Image (cartoon, coloured by chain):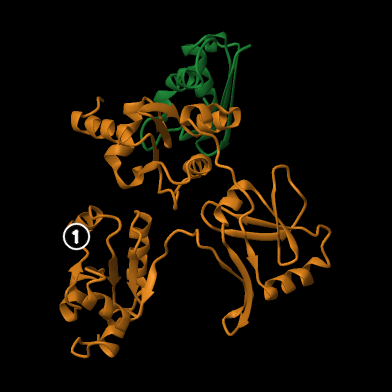
Amino acid sequence: MSLDADLKNRLDTFVKSHEVFLFMKGTRTFPQCGFSASVVEILDEYLPDGYETFNVLADQGVREGIKEYSDWPTIPQLYIKGEFVGGRDIVAQMHESGELTGLLGQGPVEVGPPGITITDAAAGAFKDAQQDEEFKDLRLTVTGQFQYGLSFGPAHDGDIVEQAGGLTVRMDRGTARRAQGMTIDFVSGKDGTGFKIDNPNEPPKVKQLGPAELKQKLDDGAVTHLYDVRTPAERGMAVIEPSVLLDEDAAAALGALDKKTPIAFYCHSGARSQAAAQHFLQQGFSEVYNLAGGIDAWSQIVDDSVPRY
Amino acid sequence: MSIEQQVKDSIEQAMDATSVDVAQVSGGHFEIRVVSTAFEGKSLLQKQRLVLSAIAHLMKGEQAPVHAVDKLETIIP
């Protein structure tokens, strides 16, 4: 099997388009495989803003073609200045040895204490728990996928240490980078009792809009692309105008839009459209809305001329 | 023949190695350690290519017996 000329040209263009280009499974904020995640984790240390990734799971041609192109059997694959560097194992070793610093022309970005806020309520809860603990320092973990860990534990080499809310908080470098400006609160209410974390570094999430809020955004032109993820039969019964049925053609056209385009989804009650919205968020769209309650809520609140079914 | 043995044999046939150790750490995932003078004067990438090209036929396609090499050590004796 030899590489198709068009595909080869495409890959040539990719690897030359940015100084640092990573072919991976998933995206920087949603890696879909552990190896890809660990290369992202390393690159983030050096280049918090400046590198480009391509999700091979979204393009079968590239997924197979890049293996041939690089003469390398697995994903992820890292290119620096148009040259193939290697996969996860090589990148990790070059990171350990310091070679990556030479190749990138810069070392890991210095990370200082992140400026965490622990509210009085949270500090009180921690101090209650602390009494029974062998170790008195709080360890905070924020993974690359923004999952959080809070526990009492021992010191580790290379810890970044910060005082907050009268507590000593320890964390690794990656956590410190992802926790800049984070707030830890403790809330109790009808939705339960527990720690509540507000972290401005978290990647975008699907935003929920009520029917009136969506109507407003459509009227203002703040949302210009509304997709109906229901079946054609359901669409025959009731529809929000203007919207597009999300069939294969529409999905392809949507995938080609600028990733900053605000996009919204609806279905009958809001669950199917949430799944679709999540999917396109993972494709890299940054402003993604879901109509909470679906067309059923829309009929009741915004437009009673839309039949309920 | 086990997949480990196939991987080991393929590497030994392709290059002059002092020792080849292969371990399957989970389904389709392997760790490989090769000691060989053939690695002398080569970059990390060239060393890994040398080993991976020897087992390329075991890594091709959706049903490939070798899905990923989690760890590949290339050692000069």
- How far across and down, in percent of the image, does residue A212 sit? 30, 83
Instruction: Name which residue lies at 71% across and 67% down.
Output: A165
- How far across and down, in percent of the image, does residue A144 sit? 53, 51
Which of the 4 image quarters holds residue A233?
Answer: bottom left
- How far across and down, in percent of the image, does residue A9 sit? 22, 31
Q: Is residue A82 above or below residue A241?
A: above
**Chain drawn orange, letter?**
A
User: Is A51 on the left-hand or right-hand side of B70?
Assistant: left
- How far across and down, in percent of the image, does residue A231 sit? 22, 70
Instruction: Name which residue lies at 26% across and 68% down.
Output: A229
Instruction: Name which residue lies at 54% across and 63% down.
Output: A199
SS class, disc 1: helix
Q: Is residue B19 above or below residue A33?
A: above
Q: Is residue A58 above or below residue A191?
A: above
Q: Is residue A111 above or below residue A201?
A: above
Instruction: Give the color of chain B as drawn.
Output: green
User: Is A200 on the left-hand or right-hand side of A209?
Assistant: right
Please tell me which residue lies in front, A46 or A252. A46
Please tell me which residue lies in front, A168 or B65. A168
Q: Chain of mark 1?
A: A
Amino acid type at circle 1 is: Ala
Q: How many marks?
A: 1
Q: Residues within 10 Å of mark 1 (few under 14, many from 20)?
A: few
Residue topped by disc 1:
A250
Please tell me which residue lies in front, A296 or A209. A209
